Image (cartoon, grey):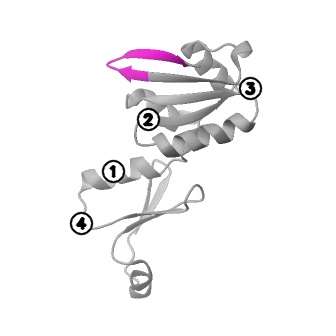
Amino acid sequence: VARTESEVTMFHVFNSELVAEYGSKVVLFKEFDEGRNDLEGDFTSESLQAFMDDHKFELVMLFEGDAAIDRIFTKEKKAMFLFQKKDGDHTQQFKEAAATLKDSMIFTKVKFSGELGKNVADYIGVKEDDLPCVRIIDSKGGDIAKYVYS
């Protein structure tokens, strides 16, 4: 049985050979970061949703499309933005910080060259002369606190 929701295709496997290989649990396979996450033990619909929300995006997600807007702004999550024109040493340092701090906020990088990138930069108060730079936002109740990381 398969269904697609929020860019995730889900399968319920009845094949005993697959269950023998992977165990009787929820397994999320993905083509980035660690490649696989396992949800151990019993679960509820809430814990399954939280597991998917925690693992379906890259450690440092590219800020593009509705999923990024929803994840950060609609769900009012804290986020650290890396604004840049191109990758460099700062990109790897940002990813290392994300690995350490991933439980405290979302890490996202923004391509300043695209329309969405320029719009979010303008919204957060980033100018082209600031690049590359990091900004932290905390959105709660429609208010957004913006912090310059120096």
Per the picture, the main secondary structure of the magenta-coloured stretch is strand
Tag 3: amino acid: Ser
Q: Are marks 4 and 3 in contact (CB under 8 Å)?
A: no
Q: Secondary structure at mark 1?
A: helix
Q: Secondary structure at mark 4?
A: loop
Q: Quadrant of the N terminus?
A: bottom left
Rounded to the nearest angstrom, the CA distance separating label 1 from label 3 is 33 Å
Mark earlier in primary sequence (1, 3): 1
Mark earlier in primary sequence (4, 3): 4
- The dot on residue 42 is 4
Which class describes the residues within 10 Å of circle 2: few (<14), some (14-19), or many (20+)?
A: some
Pick whichever, 39 or 113, lies toward us. 39
Which class describes the residues within 10 Å of circle 4: few (<14), some (14-19), or many (20+)?
A: few
Q: Quadrant of residue 110?
A: top right
The residue indicated by pointer 1 is 49
Q: Is residue 131 left or right of residue 45?
A: right
Residue 124 drawn in magenta: no
Which of discs 3 and 2 lies nearer the camera? The answer is 2
Q: Secondary structure at mark 2?
A: loop
Q: Is residue 30 visible?
A: yes
The residue indicated by pointer 3 is 113
Q: Is residue 69 above or below residue 149?
A: below
Q: Which residues are magenta?
A: 138-148
Tag 4: amino acid: Asp
Which of discs 4 and 1 lies nearer the camera? The answer is 4
The residue indicated by pointer 2 is 105
